[in-house]
Image: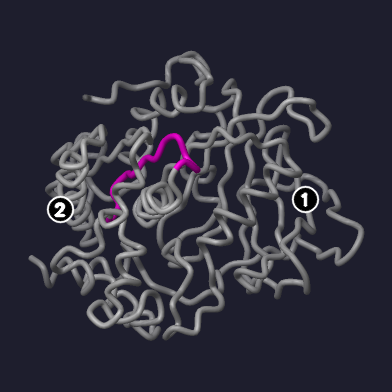
Amino acid sequence: MRSRALTALAVTFILAAGATPAVADPDWSIVPEGGPTKAPAVPENSRRSAPWQKALPGSARVVRERWLGPRTLDILISSPSIGRMMPVRLLLPKGWSKSAKRTWPVLYLLHGGADDYTSWTRMTDVAAFTENVDAIVVMPEAGRAGNYSDWYNGGRGGTPKWATFHTYEVRRLVEIGYRGGTRRAIAGLSMGAYGAMKYAARYPGMFRFAGSYSGIVATGLPGIPEVIMNAQASEKQNPKALWGDPVKDKKVWAMNDPMALAPGLKGTSLYISSGTTSFLGPLDPPGSPWHPAHLGEPISAYTAKALSRRLNGLGIRHTLNLYANGTHTWPYWTREFKASFPMIQAALGIGRGGAKDGWQLSSGR
C-alpha cells in the first residue's frame, strides 16, 4: 500500500514544483511607480498561460488591482520573497472601503497542490457562502507545490520564501492597505491544510483558528519524508531543496513539521479532518471512477491521528473529524470547511449568523 501511496502522492497530493507558478495573467499590466491601478472587471474564470513576471526592485508592494465583481478583488504583489509578481484574491465584506475607519477580521484560505489562488472561488461557492460574513477572505498564490515554506536550498536560502510571502508580505499589505484587522483565521485543503497548521504552529498567536482538510500535518512520521522527497524528484527538482536531507538536516525538517511545532498551537482553535479509507463516499456520484490520488486520505489520516495524540499529550483541545469513506476531492473539503465555519466565526468574533442562510453544516463532533 505504501508504494502505491508514494506514487499517487508524488503526482497529485504534495506535487513538488519549482518556485515559479505555472500560470500567469496577461490582463495584469505592471505599474512600476505611483501605486496600484485599477483595471476593468474581467470574468472570474479567465485562465492564464505565461509565467509570472519578475518582481520589481525594492520592498513588497501592491502594483495592480483588478476587480472581478462587487466583492472580488485581485491584487498583484511585487514580492522580493518569491522574486515574482504574485497574485492574491480578496473577498471583501459589505460596507468595506479603503477609507473605512474600522478594520475587519481576516480569514486566509490556502489552496492545494497543482492549483492556484483562484481555486477556492473556482471550485466552491465560498463567495456566496461568505456574502453576509463581516470579514475579509484572503486567498494567496502559493505555487503549484511551494509547500508553504521558505526553501532551504542547500543551506543557501533565497527564493522561494513562501512562508515569508504569506505571513509577512501578504499579511502586512492586507492590514496596511485593505483594512485587515488582527483577528485572523486560516484554513486549507491538502497542501494548503499542511500550510494552515504549520503557519499556526510556527507563528503562535498569529491565527486564532487553524483548519486542516485532508492534509499532511506530521511530516516526520515514518514514510512521510519519502513521500515528500519522491514528490520533489517526480517534478525534476532536487529532492533536498525544500528542507534539506531528512536525517542530516533534521532540525530544518522539524522547523517545518506541525507535530514538532505543536506546542505553538496552544490557545488556537483547531479543526483537523480527513477520510481514512480512500474509498468512494456519500459525496461521490454513483459510478465515479476511483483514482490513486484518493490514497491521500489514509495518508493524511495517518498524520492527523499522530498530531491529535501529540495535542492530547500537550493538553491542547482540538476537533478531529475522521470520516472513513470519502475521496481526495473538493466536495469533501467544502463540506469540512463549512462544518468548521462556526469555529471560524467564533474565533474571529463575528457571531453565529454571518454565513448565508442554509449553508452551515454540522461538524459531526
Q: Amino acid at mark 2?
A: Tyr
Determine which quarter of the picture holds residue 158: bottom right
Question: Is the image coloured rainbow, by chain, by secondary structure, or in one colour?
Answer: one colour
Residue 225 image offset from top left, x and y in percent: 23, 71
Q: Which residue is mark 1?
A: 65
> Residue at horizontal 35%, vertical 72%?
252
Could you tell me if the residues under marks 1 and 2 are in contact, i.e. CB atoms within 8 Å?
A: no
Q: Is residue 14 magenta?
A: no
Q: Residues within 10 Å of mark 2 (few under 14, many from 20)?
A: some
Closer-to-camera residue (190/168): 168
Residue 138 image offset from top left, x and y in percent: 58, 43
SS for callout 1: strand
Quarter of the image with the N terminus in it:
bottom left
Closer-to-camera residue (346/359): 346
| Residue segment shown in magenta | 205-216
Residue 119 image offset from top left, x and y in percent: 50, 50
Q: Which residue is mark 2?
A: 302
Quarter of the image with the C terminus in it:
top left
Above or below, 222 against 88 in this view is below
Does 231 sit left or right of 349 as displayed? Answer: left
Above or below, 183 against 46 in this view is above
Kindly report which numbered mark, 1 or 2, lies closer to the viewer in this rendering: 2
SS for callout 2: helix
Q: Amino acid at mark 1?
A: Glu
Q: Label 1 to label 2, Cα distance in Å? A: 41 Å
Q: Residue furthest right?
A: 34
Of the image marks 1 and 2, the number of the one nearer the N terminus: 1
Q: Is residue 208 magenta?
A: yes
> Residue at horizontal 41%, vertical 47%?
200
Q: Residues within 10 Å of mark 1 (few under 14, many from 20)?
A: many
Residue 244: which disc? none
> Residue at horizontal 73%, vertical 65%?
26
